[in-house]
Amino acid sequence: MTGLLKYGSGQRVGRRVQGFLWATSLVALSLPVLMAQPAGVTPNTAGTSTAAVTDSPAYKRGRLLFIQCRACHDLKPSPVEKVGPNLAGLFGRAAAAAPDFGYSPALRSAKITWDRQTLDTWLEKPGSMVPGNIMAFAGIANPADRAALISYIEVESASR
């Protein structure tokens, strides 16, 4: 049991917590860059081509905002195990459904299917949406930032 720590609901974790602490410090150093909000962020990506979406201010803003997420999450299938679950194919997937990830009992019992609305509610304040979840993230208060981040995640997590 050397190197294991108790976290949140009593789960034992080791390297994941160490990775999280490293990632948290990286995010703290990146926050000044992330706080610059461009004018005119428009979140709707439905019915537009991928090229048009990836050139949009919302997508570019979402890419910047995802810096704080990528320390814990990948958007493409990856053999690398991170602190958080892989988000590849997230939209339309049930919460706590990624294989080989130790979700909290609270999230495993939540009846959530990820779409733009549920992800918006989650990103606003994960602890309010699913009390007892173990995601160490306070949330994003700004609706335009959440919409931009969701637009980016939707494009980049889709299987191509």
Image (tube, rainbow, N blue to C red):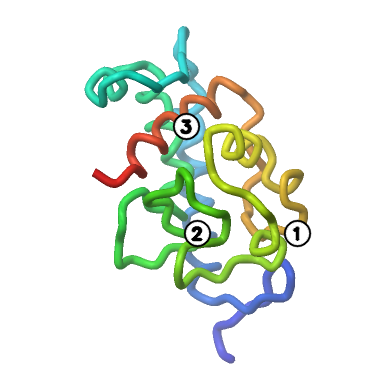
Badge 1 marks a residue whose secondary structure is loop
Tell me the tag on residue 84: 2
Q: Are marks 2 and 1 in contact (CB under 8 Å)?
A: no
Q: Residue 78 is drawn in which quadrant?
A: bottom left
Q: Earlier in the sequence, mark 2 or mark 1?
A: 2
Q: Residue at x 74, y 70 (%)?
A: 9
Residue 133: give x, y in percent of width and height.
69, 58
Q: Residue at x 31, y 19 (%)?
A: 48
Q: Residue 50 is drawn in which quadrant?
A: top left
Q: Are marks 3 and 1 in contact (CB under 8 Å)?
A: no
Mark 2 Cα-neighbour bin, 10 Å: few <14, some 14–19, many ≥20: many
The C terminus lies in which quarter of the figure?
A: top left
Q: Residue 142 is drawn in which quadrant?
A: top right
**Is residue 62 found left or right of 117 in the rendered image?**
left
- Identified by mark 2, the residue type is Gly
* Disc 3: which residue: 149
- Identified by mark 3, the residue type is Leu
Residue 146 to residue 56: above or below? below
Q: Earlier in the sequence, mark 3 or mark 1?
A: 1
